[in-house]
Amino acid sequence: MATVHLLGANANDDTDRQAAAKNQIIQMNGYGNDRFVVHDIVQTRWGKSYGLINLQTRRFGQCDLIRPLSQKFGIGYYYDDENPEFMDGMEVAILHAEAEQHQKAEQEAKRQEQEHTRQLEAVGRERLQSLVPADAKAVIIAELHEDDSDMMTDYVGYHRLRRVILGFSPHTKDLFSEMRRHAARFSETAHLAEENKEYEHREKYAGGAGYYLGESKYGGWIVTKEKYFKDREAIINAFALIAGEEDNIRVEAPAAANAVPAAVTGNFSIVDYSERAIAVFGDTRTVKEELKASGGRYNPNLTHGGEKKAGWIFPKTKEQAVRNLLTVK
């Protein structure tokens, strides 16, 4: 004998005992209070299992426990033990045929959706093959969030409506300056390109959203950085579905092999500091994170032109990378 103990109702139910008959109408208490007809009953190792058809949706269902309505307690399936209801066998057969049609239609819709997803992923992989740099270690993403918070239940949360690829990064450091530059590529996040401390969020703690730019993670657009991918192919696989929709890509095409990389223009000077080092002087506040990420070391006491000056020192081997980053006015 298999039994189920209902703690709240303080009752035991023998699941081997048949509670309802074929063609009998039962109802669900809670979750819509729908009505069902029992179209099949099978014996399992855990007791009776009842095949159901929802009288409202004409869809199949299943339950293992049906209790008498006179002992109703909480959410569950119940049969009327005082005035039981039954349907004609032919009516149940018609309902069964309709439920099968719904089931087949849903299975076909699911198959088509899976095929559509495979096609999008294939297109996305092809697109990303020409866009993801060989040294990419992270992806800059724009996300549209919708607030799911409920003040009545004190629930706080959100869900994502859309993701847009803004660019790729050769490092895994969280740099708001880098996020701002990429934010400018997409009209919906262009306002985040301005330097505004209120847009900068640092939530590197359990349950936090990490570093991101935006007014709030609970609603609207934010810009964030996804990292720690094993290699370039892992990035392509992870974002293939997103890239399958062309409108979800706001990435600049890679520069030609002989083209001059895009640079930040400013009042800079790049000088030979020693046989093994170069130095950068000038107004570097807006690019300090990039200089640091490029291997630079800030020193407030460098000597240049016979004077003490603050600047950035780099190994000579980094000179081309620095000149690629900075354009002198």
Image (cartoon, helix red, strand yellow):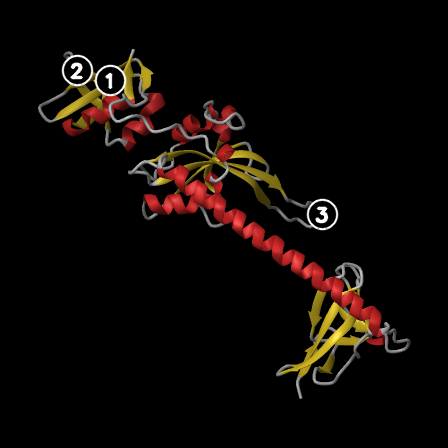
Q: Within the image, what quadrant is residue 111 found in?
A: bottom right
Place of residue 235 in the rendered image (x, y in percent of width and height, measured from the top left): 38, 44
Question: How many neighbours does mark 1 have within 10 angstroms: few (below 14), some (14-19), or many (20 or more)?
Answer: some
The answer to whether residue 299 is seen in the rendering is no
Q: For the view shown, which residue lies furthest in the left direction?
A: 275
What residue sits 14% from the left and 12% below the top? 306
- Count neighbours of disc 3 (C-alpha within 10 A) and say few if under 14, some if 14 to 19, many if 20 or more: few
Q: What residue does disc 2 label?
A: 304
x and y, in percent, of residue 65 in the image:
72, 76
Vertical placement of 190 versus 240: above or below?
above
Q: Residue at x 62, y 53 (%)?
A: 109
Amino acid type shown at disc 2: His
Q: Earlier in the sequence, mark 2 or mark 3?
A: 3
Residue lying at 70% horizontally and 72% vertically, measured from the top left: 63
Q: Crowding near pointer 2: few (<14 within 10 Å), some, many (20+)?
A: some
Q: Quadrant of residue 315?
A: top left
Q: Are marks 2 and 1 in contact (CB under 8 Å)?
A: yes
In this rendering, position of residue 286 left or right of residue 195: left
Q: Which residue is mark 3?
A: 152
Specify whether 81 is left or right of 41: right
State which quarter of the image contains the C terminus: top left
Q: Looking at this rendering, what residue extends furthest in the bottom direction? A: 1
Q: CA distance from mark 2 to mark 1?
A: 9 Å
CA gap, disc 2 and disc 3: 64 Å
**Residue underneath mark 1:** 281
